[in-house]
Structure formats: C-alpha cells, structure tokens
Amino acid sequence: MPGQIYALTGNQIVARAAIDVGCRFYAGYPISPSSEIAAEMAKALPKVGGAFIQMEDEIASMAAIIGASLTGKKSMTATSGPGFSLKQENLGFACMTEVPCVVVNVMRNGPSTGMPTFPGQGDLMQAKWGTHGDHPIIVLAPAYHREIYDETIRAFNLSEKYRQPVVLLSDETLAQMSGRLEIPDKSELIVINRETPKVGPKEYKPFDQSQGLVPPLASFFEGYRFHVTGLTHDDTGFPTENTTIAEQLLSRMRRKLTENLDDILKWEDYLVDDADILIVSLGSASRSALQAINEARESDGIKVGMFRPITLWPFPEEALKKAARNAKRIIVVEMNEGQMALEVERILHRTIETVLRYNGQMISPDEILNRIKSYESCEAAKV
Amino acid sequence: MSKLAEVDYNQYLRVHKLPTTWCAGCGDGAIMKSLIRALDELQLPRDETAIISGIGCSGRFSGYLDYNTLHVTHGRPLAFATGMKMAHPKGKIIVVSGDGDSLAIGGNHFIHACRRNIDLTLIIINNYTYGLTGGQVSPSTPLDSSSPTAPYGSIEPTFDTCKVAMAAGASFVSRTVVASPLHMDKMIKAGLSHSGFSVVEVMSNCHINWGRKNEYAAAADLIKHLKDRSTFSAEESEADGKHLLGILRQDAEMKEYATTYYQMVEAVQAKMAEKKGA
Ligand SMILES: Cc1ncc(C[n+]2csc(CCOP(=O)(O)OP(=O)(O)O)c2C)c(N)n1
C-alpha cells in the first residue's frame, strides 16, 4: 500500500523518520543548518509522549541522549560541524559503554565557524576518528530525500541492534532542499529494538562476552542495578586494569561491526558493469555526479558509472573493488580536500583522479563532465 | 548528644568492590557513609534510584553503591542526569561531583541545572582541589594556596558554590562539612527529600593533595581546620569569608522542570484528543 506523499526538507524528513522508528528523546543545541530538526522534534515529541530538551551546549546534548538511552528510550541529537566537534568526547563514551543513540551531523563548510549556511563534506574523517582512541562507529550518508528517511530508520535500527552510536551525515543542501517524499506505510517499517537480558538481575552482566558480540542491554530503573563507566571495564561493567580484558573489550567492539558487514554495509552501483570510468561520490555531491554521468553517456557515448557508499564507515571495501574491477579511470567527487579519495586510494591501490570543492559551493555537473572528458589531463590530476 | 544512625552499610554497598581507591582518611568515605545513612532513613526504592558521578576521586562514588549507577565524563554528570530524568521522570537521581567537576569543567551544566530547577540532587564534594590529578588549583582553592599549578601561591579568586547556585535558581541550597557527620546527614537527607534541584555542598578534606602542600598533612588537622573555617553565622561568614553552613535556601513552590514539561505534554495531548473528538 503506498503511503502518503509529502514535500519535505531533508531536515524535516530526519525528524519524521525518527518519530516513526520510535525515537522518544531528543536533546540538542541550535546550529545551522541543522536547527529545523530540533524544531520538528520539539513539536512532535510531546504528541507521542516523548521528551525534548534544548540543552546548554552540544556537550550536554550528547550527554543527555546517552543518559536517556540508558532508560531504554531511543534517543537522538542533531548538529553541524562546530557542535559535532563538541560532541566527540561523549560520543566516544557512548562507543565505549555501548549505548545506542543517533547523532545527526548536517555538514556545512568548515573548518571552524566556516560558512554556516553553505554545504560541505569536510567531516567524513571526523565522523570516523573524531573521538579519541580506537573505537567502532557506523556512519551513514544518504543522498536523496527518500534515502534520508530510510537511512534515519536504519541508523536507529543499527544503533539498537549493535549497541552502537550511529552517525547520520547529511549536508546543508540535502537538509534545506525540499523534495517529494512518499512515506512508507507503517506496516512496511522495519523497527529493531535493542535486545534486553533474558537472565535475572543477579546473573546479568552488561558486557558479557559469552553472550556474543552484542551483549543484551538492560535499562536503568528496571531492577538490574548495573554499573556503566567510560573506564575500561570487564564483563560486569566495573573498571579493570587487566590488559587482557582491555584487549578483549576493544576487539569485541571492533568485531561487532567487522563480523556483520553484510548487514551494515549499503552502497549503490550505478551503471558500473560496462563503465570505463568509475566515479566514486557520496551525499549531495553524488547528485551532480549522476547528472554528469547521464550526460556523458547520452551526449558523448562515454561509459561512466558510479559507486556511491551509503554506509560510509565501515567503508564498503569489497563492493568498491568489485565496482572498480573493469574501470580504466577512477574519479572521486566530494566537497572537501580529498578525504574519501584517501580511502579509495587505500582500497584500490591505484592512481585516482579527483573533482573537489571546498569553498562552500556545490560541485556542478559540468565540472565533473569536464573531468570525465579530459583524458589527457588525467596524469596531472593525481591526488 | 545525639548519635549517628546505626545502619548496615554493607547492605547498600557493592562490598566486592571494596576497598575503595581513596586515601586513608579521605572525606569521600565519610560522605559516602553519610549518604548511605540518608538513603537508609529515606528508604528510597533502590531500583528507582540512580547515582551518577563525574571524573575525579569523587567520581568513584557510583561504582561502590548498589544502585543504577553511571560513571561519566569529566564535568558532565549533570548533563547525563538531565537526559535521564527527562526520559524517566519517576526516577530519583543523585549526582556526586567534585569541585573541579562541577564548578570548572562542568560549571555550565551546574548553572543550567540550577536555572531549570530540575529534580536532581547534586552533592558537590568541595575538597579545595583537583584531588585525583594531584592537587591543581580548582575554582574553590583558597587564595594563596600552594599547588603544582600555583607554585607561588594561588591568585585565582574562588566561587562561593552556594551563592552561585542560588543566583542561578536552584530551589534547595545547603552547605555542610565533613567534620560534622550529624549535620552532614541532616543536609543530605534534606536535599534528597526536596523536589526540585537540590545542591548540597560538602566541605571535605584532601589532606594528601591539598593539605600536604598547605600545612595540613594530617587528615585530623585538615578536618579541624575545615570546621574552624565554617560557621552557622551569616555575619561571621560575611565578615571573614568562612563557609556558611546550613540550609541557605529551601523553596518547595518553585516550578520543577520535568514536571512542567510533562504537564505541557499532557496539555498538548488533551488538545489533540479534543480535535479528534470534534
Ligand atoms: C576532559 C577531561 N579533562 C581532564 C581530565 C583529568 N582529570 C581527571 S580528574 C580531574 C579533576 C578532579 O577534580 P575534582 O573534580 O575536584 O574531583 P576530586 O578528584 O577532587 O574528587 C581532572 C582534571 C579528564 N579526565 N577529562
């Protein structure tokens, strides 16, 4: 059954999907171009009995969603570059304590205050490595309005399933642009809730390795009375300085993701089978790339295709290798100084070209088309 | 003379996590026992109570008490607690924090928790210093103190925690001192019984990292000094800067944040139902 059709901005869609998937707590701090997500949540949450709070800063917002999630409520915060930087310490706390939550980063052009109302994709590496220490993280990067809806749903689902903070990377263009969205019928929604313990409080261990890679998580105030700390901890949740346990903990947290890649990774192959040239792009930049590809094929008969990660981290390595197998040229298109290009180069071990922009302007299809057509200059354009 | 309540402390402790990491004679132990006596007397339902602490020696509180416990990042326990309270308004949440944790790095969260008057109890253990990291200057280190980060004497003006709390809007504000366990029990109990944001500042001894550098190397000497530096007289406190003890504000009428929020939720939902019915 088709759902209702709406014209919504990317930011509105994030909020809509969050409510649909069961998010019942939001804490945030205003920042362009993410603020409408907070406004939508402030309006919607009371209607479903949930809580909204505007905190005193982004550090507090991140802390608040972790505190709320520990009571069993699905929780979210949204921000942009400067606020994303402030959230990092507590984001790491959520990784370490394995508390599900969703952090939306509507990227704008940086660094620092940068260009608050202009698009950028400069936070790809920060989304992966922004907090200190080795840690697992899932980062999703939608490119279309319907995909923003689906990926927001998936962000919550992955977060609940893997006891893992998930970052949703949007950007200024996606967030502010209105688009047509057919919201799926409620009956079609897949909603995953965190696994809760099957044992009683006496036997419960919140980080029990024997329960598999993702130990069930009890909620506070339900009789379990367990301890949660950002210190390195053992199965019971209490601090330990045992180096063997420390290694086991970090390994298990990493393996939560690396052993479930089939479930976590998502990407789009667009006309890659016969492609001589493979474009690798993501988010709103990939929409310009798509137009360039279609033009190149239609007007010039150049066989171009695109690989587009939707799960950005962990990066869909094998899928990229497969898509690039027959391509003679690889062109990475992104709105930064070449962050994803580094990853693509690492995975493919070959020379790649780039079309980059980091001045607050979108990359135009023409720029990409020019690069596609400029066979001669490709040697000079190595990263 | 009245006596301390007799309590089976072990019943409230995670005894297998003892001994604590605290130095012998540290005020943290005495304060934890006082908190246990208050919890015992009030009989707060264990499963409906959470204890959240930040980072520092005082941060270790949460690990030892058999409640729902959360040990968070430095300075942020009030922010975690605010989220938890809003998500689960029935819960009783106690925050334990050092003077560095709540007045320096967490100062912003402190004033905003006061402003919201959200129903949390904050026990600030003011030991004049950053205990865990070796006695650096905190916002409450007495002027002229010697410290690794003030080797020629501290020039940092200090906060009066309770005045800050009152100015920022907390509805319950009190101060006590580790030298007077009975008074400490009374203040903590009163703070826990209050609904609204309650602040209990406990003047405590870090004889190791503040005392040794400032002529109070023995726990007993520093505890006596803290007692001498405290007063129940507002005039005396004004006159020579002694720590004013007692309940400095108690206002049960002030609007509590979580209650106000959920009243708004009810009103919004009532309006929705009305619209549907019409
Ligand atoms: C973000 C951050 N900065 C600094 C530290 C290091 N640190 C640990 S405890 C502490 C100070 C603790 O002092 P206080 O809050 O007064 O508590 P006490 O140890 O005296 O109980 C500091 C600065 C940290 N853990 N995290």
Image (cartoon, rainbow, N blue to C red):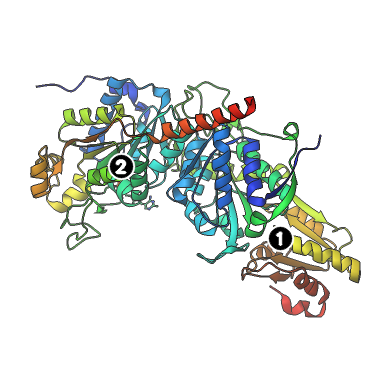
Q: Residue drawn at (35%, 32%), measured in percent from left and top?
A: B64
Q: Which residue is mark 1?
A: A347
Quadrant in the picture for residue B84: top left
Nearest the camera: B55 or A295? A295
Q: Is residue A325 above or below residue B114?
A: below
Q: Is residue A97 above or below residue A135?
A: above
Amino acid identity at mark 2: Gly
Q: Is residue A266 above or below residue A358?
A: above
Is residue A330 visible in the rendered structure shown here? yes
Q: Residue drawn at (59%, 27%), measured in percent from left and top?
A: B274
Assess disc 1: are there few (<14), some (14-19) or many (≥20) residues with their C-alpha within 10 Å of its C-alpha. Answer: some
Q: Residue drawn at (81%, 58%), measured in percent from left and top?
A: A323
Q: Is residue A332 left or right of residue B253?
A: right
Separation of residues labelled 1 and 2 (CA atoms): 56 Å
Q: Is residue B2 left or right of residue A230?
A: left
Quadrant in the picture for residue B205: top left
Residue B169's disc is 2
Q: Is residue A285 left or right of residue B79?
A: right
Is residue A74 visible in the rendered structure shown here? no
Q: Is residue B92 above or below residue A105?
A: above
Amino acid identity at mark 1: Ile
Assess disc 2: are there few (<14), some (14-19) or many (≥20) residues with their C-alpha within 10 Å of its C-alpha. Answer: some
Mark 1 lies within 8 Å of ligand 1 (Cβ measured): no
